[in-house]
Amino acid sequence: MENTMLCVLLLLSILIYCGHCGENYALPSASVSTSPQGPLYSGETVTLQCDIPDYTDWTYNWYRNNQQFSSQTSETITISLPDQAGQYQCRGTRTTRPQWSNLSSSLPIIITALPETTLSVEPNPVFPGETVTLMCSVGSDSSWNYKWYKDRNDNEVSQSVIHTITGDTLTISRAAESDQGLYLCQGQRRSRPTSSQPSNVITLTVNALPTASVSISPQGLFYSGETVSMQCDISMYTDWTYSWFIGNNFKSSTPGQTITTLSNQAGQYRCVGGRTGRPQWSQLSVFLPIRVTDNQPSTTLTSDKEDVFTGDSVTLTCTVESSGWKFYWYRHRPDSTPVTTTSGYSYTLSWVSVSDGGQYWCRAGRGDPVYYTLYSDPVQINITERPVAVLTLQPNWTQIFIRETVTMRCDIQGGGDSDWNYRWYKNSQSVIPFNTTPEYRISPVYMSNSGLYTCEGVKGNKISKTSDAVQLTVSDKPKAVLSISPQWLNPGDSVTLSCEVDKTSKGWRFSWYRTVPYRAGLPSLSDSSYSVETLSDSSTGTTESFYTLSPAGHTGGYVCRAGRGDPVYDTLYSEPQFLWSGDLQSSVSLRISPNTTQHFRSKSLSLSCEEKGNSTGWRLMRYTERGVESGCVSNWGSITGSTCTISYTYTWYSGVFWCESGSGEYSNAVNITVDDGYVILESPVHPMTEGDSVTLCCKYWTTSSNIKADFYKDGVLIKNEIIGEMTIPAVSKSDEGFYKCKYPDKGESPESWMTVRVLPGSVVSISLPRLLCGLLVVSPFLLVSIVLTVKCCRARGLCSTVKSPQDQIRSDDVIEQTESSV
């Protein structure tokens, strides 16, 4: 029940209040006004007023751009433009009801731009003394007054004698350099807006007047009676008229730059230019003084050389006190036609000949007409033929070897006295720029000294002709080259040793040596393979490049070398060359097994040095294209006693073999060929003696049986044998030569040389044909018996067998006794 009563009372209260709410009372309105009204300009002040028509006792609140503007509460406020432009509102407040007004609408405070100002100038740039007009305008309104500023906006140009301000115009009379600068203007008036914007800035340039200068020709001191030309030069513009002054007195005015006057009109001259266009005047030139003397000038003639050689140059110099002269040059007579005229004071005679010699004069002249100086005194020029330098080598060898000594001599031909110094050149580059002696010695010479050498003589300022070039070629130390002919000996033969050094070199003396096993203390070859002993009759050397061994003797080695110069410069020793004899020697013999000169590859071979005397220290030697090899070394074979056994032969074992002792004795030599073909010829190792019987055997690689073979001597087929061997019953000298054999379809052997000796004073032997003839006379039966016996022996004999005539002596004795009895 109580709750119900509370709800009823609450409802009645709400209804009563809502009845009061139906009464609507509006708040007072506020508005903002401005003074002045209309467009607002930068620099002005504006008064704002807040108007609230109802009630009084208002306090005013001001807002700018929705922010409370200031603490002012008055009805009006004052703002400055342009800084305080914006959107303005106001509202009133009071202590009684209503306590506030509505907020006013926004009033925009907008700045209107000041009128634009335009500045122009005429002319610009300007020359000193000219009038300049500057004009300022603000649109088309003529109610403006104008202020003028220079360089700064606080530096106002005032009215003066030079600066005249009339309306919108500033006139500068007689412009000077101080008037140059930056100019601007601004309009002002009483009505709003009271000022315009500042004008554009104009730079006024004051250019200096063109400079005038006076030049004179000729220059320097003038002589009485000369004609002088003066020229007024103005660097800029054209169409000038030139005015001339002597001192400060006007002389003349001409359209041309140049005036001509006599030199006796001395004074201070200057000029100025004038023209109708801008600029109308130049600056006045500085004074140019003209000085005059009454004396006629003289000249002095000098020469840089008086005694010269043909081909030289001579420079004559003519001097005079002042400048601007041309120079006239005379030869033989001063009143003759000039040889030449020069603008300079010197005259050079280039590449002179003897005919250019004689006396010379000079004089100078200038102006138009020409004003001449006096003639100079004469100068005598003596010209002689240039001496010739001749370079010679001493000794005269163009091919020089390293570490030799060479001397070059420079002789001056046609050079008169001997007071010469010398210059030396290599490949046109100076090597000795000054030498008082005519010789240039290089000791020792090296490769770097090679080149083309020349020389020339120098005497004071005179130089001889350069010599012809001489080529100096420096080579490595030469090595002599020895050759022996013939290299294989026949008993009693003469042998020629020939020694040669570089064919382009000269002046050698040749020495000859026999090789001996190496011994310390004796001259030796560079590889110490042999020492050398001088052949007895060649100790001093000879200019002949050959040496004859007569008789040659036996197997032996030889070398040569050459020397030249003082001190003597020696070549290297030649490589040793060997003279071979196949004849057996008394001291030692070389034996071969198998006893033939040709051998198949991969077979065994033994070589034995069989001593017959007291010689010791024997060694086996071999000569091939590679040179001499000593000893039976491991890559040859093995040594047993005095025998060298080669168990497996190769083709490169081929060569000439011999034995030699420590004392220098030699055995016979054997030429052995190891062939990798299928056929060889077994032939005698040692020379045959005339009358010996010899059998040549043709062998095939895979068989020991006899096969049909063809035999050749010196390339000509001489016999065809079905058993593969050919026998010569009694050899003669005509059988000597190269032999080979050929198996059809199997190949052919190398050639082997067979030597046949003729022994002087031996017992006369009877050949087989002669024996048969005797037997035919004595007994046919005996003849048949002997023939059968010979055939039987041949059938059982070995290949390459030899039967000596010594073995037939007893038979021959029998035959001879039989013949005597008959």
Image: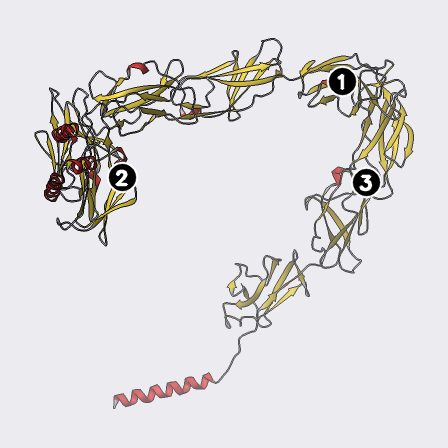
Q: Position of residue 586 (x, y in %)?
A: 15, 23
Compare marks 3 and 1 and give the one earlier in the sequence.
3
Callout 1: 10 Å neighbours few (<14), some, many (20+)? many
Tag of residue 738: 2
Q: Position of residue 718 (x, y in %)?
A: 26, 45
Q: Do the CB atoms of the residues marked 2 and 1 lie less than 8 Å apart? A: no
Question: How many numbered badges does the structure rendering display?
Answer: 3
Residue that mark 1 sits on:
318
Residue 498, quarter of picture = top left
- The alpha-carbon separation of the residues under discs 2 and 1 comes to 96 Å
Compare marks 3 and 2 and give the one earlier in the sequence.
3
Looking at the rendered structure, the kind of residue marked 3 is: Ile
- Mark 2 or 1: the one toward you: 2
Compare marks 2 and 1 and give the one earlier in the sequence.
1
What secondary structure is marked by label 1?
strand
Q: Is residue 750 visible?
A: no
